[in-house]
Image (spheres, helix red, strand yellow):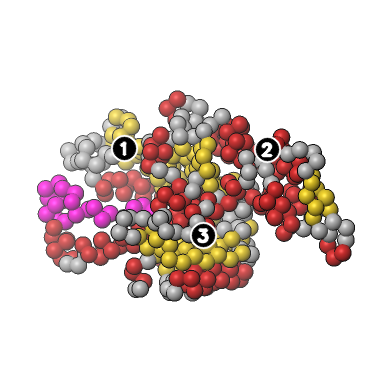
């Protein structure tokens, strides 16, 4: 099968690295052709801190995916997260020179590019500029101002900012592993593509992706992303607490958490005990499940409360900003027993676990439909979306002279037909980043 038919998503996480190869079938669902996973050794809290180890782990996952599918991996779409990601709200405006002409895409571009020039802290770079809603000559709550008359065009933006060095390090790992960087996507956005429905995004929903090193939050309302945050705690700190609290090694703590862990201590009786083999002939340790769930409960409450602070920062208590669809939990950490009930208890919001199976073809392996792979599936969806976009651009660009002539014709009559292939702000940013990484070599 030639490269053009399939795409690859690569999720570089704190605990695991997943490469997933897939294509779109005739029903618009994703058919997974191969998956490879490896233990992530060079990533701490979502940030690469050991380039050599990360490259090895990426190669391992990629080789496994290639062996499973019998395909070659060339270009990948990768996710970015980590505690260096922050977001802010910003308003900006432009005064148009000719208010007799209707607002077109160039005006929106000019406004977005103006936001990219914001002065950031040293070493930070703007990753996303996401328009919320527009104002034309003081008329508020306009979702799409194209085609309207007006002299002053204003907009509120959700601006996502990240550390330049962290982004460059991810790019470096991909290149050194012998792969091409197709695109970079914010991980909470990828997860939300995989597990949220359009109705939920319209109604208002908070997606909480609990990973190994970080917990990512994305809030949607009226179909637009309103708030993002990355909290530097995840399932890893729960394992760490069990390790310290029970004086056992990390491997045993992780197994205990997965097999017997619960976020709700009330359900375990005092006489329920699990015995853990001692190291090198030492006496086995006995741990009561009640104590285990107390340790887990304390840390989970802390994580959920931090996320809830971010949801409050967004302002969900205001009637207009109410999240009707409540909370969706995903990621490996969401599989913890009774977590859903605990989140509902703390926040008072409806909660469900998000599975990425909605977009997968019916014959996909069961393991891939686990919340564990939500980000990887979202990245694969992003890769397929980019591929089909490129294909349509290539087809429409076969005769460039005609295209250019048609564009002039369209502009002359004020139409916007040819401009359909306009790149999103994020695609432009990805291209800028790729040039930046190529030049950094």
**Helix, strand or loop at mark 2:** loop
Instruction: Assess whether mark 1 and mark 3 are in contact (beta carbons under 8 angstroms).
Output: no
Q: Residue at x 53, y 36 (%)?
A: 351
Q: Is residue 322 magenta?
A: no
Left or right of 44 in this view: 424: left
Most extreme residue toward the top is 319
Q: Provide residue 300's location: percent of width, then percent of height.
A: 66, 41
Mark pair 2, 3: CA separation? 30 Å
Left or right of 321 in this view: 155: left
In the displayed structure, would residue 262 be above or below residue 40?
above
Q: Residue at x 61, y 31 (%)?
A: 345
Left or right of 404 in this view: 208: right
Q: Which residue is mark 2?
A: 264
Mark earlier in primary sequence (1, 2): 1
Mark pair 3, 1: CA separation? 32 Å
Instruction: Assess whether mark 3 and mark 2 are in contact (beta carbons under 8 angstroms).
Output: no
Q: Provide residue 184's location: percent of width, then percent of height.
A: 45, 59
Q: Which residue is mark 1?
A: 143
Q: Provide residue 375's location: percent of width, then percent of height.
A: 49, 54
Which numbered tag is attached to residue 11? 3
Mark pair 1, 2: CA separation? 43 Å
For the N terminus, the image quarter is bottom left
Mark earlier in primary sequence (2, 3): 3
| Crowd around label 3: few <14 · some 14–19 · many ≥20 (10 Å) | many
**Helix, strand or loop at mark 1:** loop
Instruction: Using the rendered view, name the quadrant where residue 104 is placed.
Output: top left
Q: Is residue 410 magenta?
A: yes
Q: Answer yes or no: is residue 258 visible.
A: yes
**Helix, strand or loop at mark 3:** strand
State the extent of the magenta-drawn residues as a range: 407-429
In the displayed structure, would residue 436 be above or below residue 408?
below
């Amino acid at each position: 099968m030639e490269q053009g038919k399939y795409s690859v998503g690569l999720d570089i996480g704190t605990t695991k690295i997943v490469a997933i190869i897939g294509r779109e079938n005739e029903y618009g669902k994703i058919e997974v052709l191969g998956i490879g996973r490896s233990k992530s050794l060079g990533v701490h809290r979502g940030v690469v801190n050991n380039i050599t180890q990360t490259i090895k782990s990426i190669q391992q996952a990629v080789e496994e995916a290639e062996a499973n599918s019998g395909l070659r991996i060339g270009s990948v779409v990768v996710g970015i997260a980590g505690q260096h990601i922050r977001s802010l709200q910003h308003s900006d405006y432009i005064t148009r020179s000719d208010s007799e002409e209707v607002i077109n895409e160039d005006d929106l571009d000019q406004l977005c590019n103006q936001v990219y020039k914001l002065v950031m802290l040293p070493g930070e770079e703007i990753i996303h500029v996401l328009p919320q809603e527009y104002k034309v000559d003081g008329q508020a709550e306009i979702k799409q101002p194209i085609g309207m008359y007006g002299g002053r065009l204003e907009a509120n933006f959700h601006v996502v900012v990240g550390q330049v060095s962290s982004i460059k390090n991810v790019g470096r790992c991909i290149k050194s592993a012998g792969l091409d960087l197709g695109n970079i996507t914010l991980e909470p956005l990828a997860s939300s593509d995989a597990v949220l429905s359009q109705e939920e995004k319209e109604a208002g929903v908070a997606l909480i992706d609990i990973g190994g090193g970080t917990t990512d939050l994305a809030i949607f309302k009226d179909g637009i992303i309103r708030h993002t945050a990355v909290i530097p705690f995840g399932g890893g700190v729960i394992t760490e607490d069990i390790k310290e609290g029970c004086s056992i090694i990390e491997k045993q703590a992780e197994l205990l958490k997965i097999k017997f862990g619960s976020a709700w201590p009330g359900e375990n009786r005092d006489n329920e005990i699990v015995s853990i083999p001692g190291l090198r002939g030492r006496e086995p340790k006995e741990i009561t499940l009640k104590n285990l769930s107390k340790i887990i409960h304390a840390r989970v409450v802390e994580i959920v409360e931090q996320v809830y602070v971010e949801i409050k920062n967004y302002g969900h208590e205001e009637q207009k900003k109410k999240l009707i669809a409540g909370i969706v939990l995903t990621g490996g950490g969401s599989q913890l027993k009774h977590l859903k009930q605990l989140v509902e208890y703390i926040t008072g919001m409806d909660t469900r676990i998000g599975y990425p199976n909605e977009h997968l073809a019916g014959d996909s392996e069961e393991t891939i439909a686990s919340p564990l792979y939500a980000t990887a599936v979202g990245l694969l969806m992003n890769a397929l979306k980019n591929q089909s976009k490129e294909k349509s651009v290539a087809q429409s660009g076969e005769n460039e002279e005609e295209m250019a002539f048609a564009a002039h014709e369209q502009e002359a009559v004020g139409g916007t037909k040819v401009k359909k292939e306009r790149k999103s702000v994020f695609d432009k940013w990805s291209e800028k980043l790729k040039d930046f990484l190529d030049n950094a070599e």
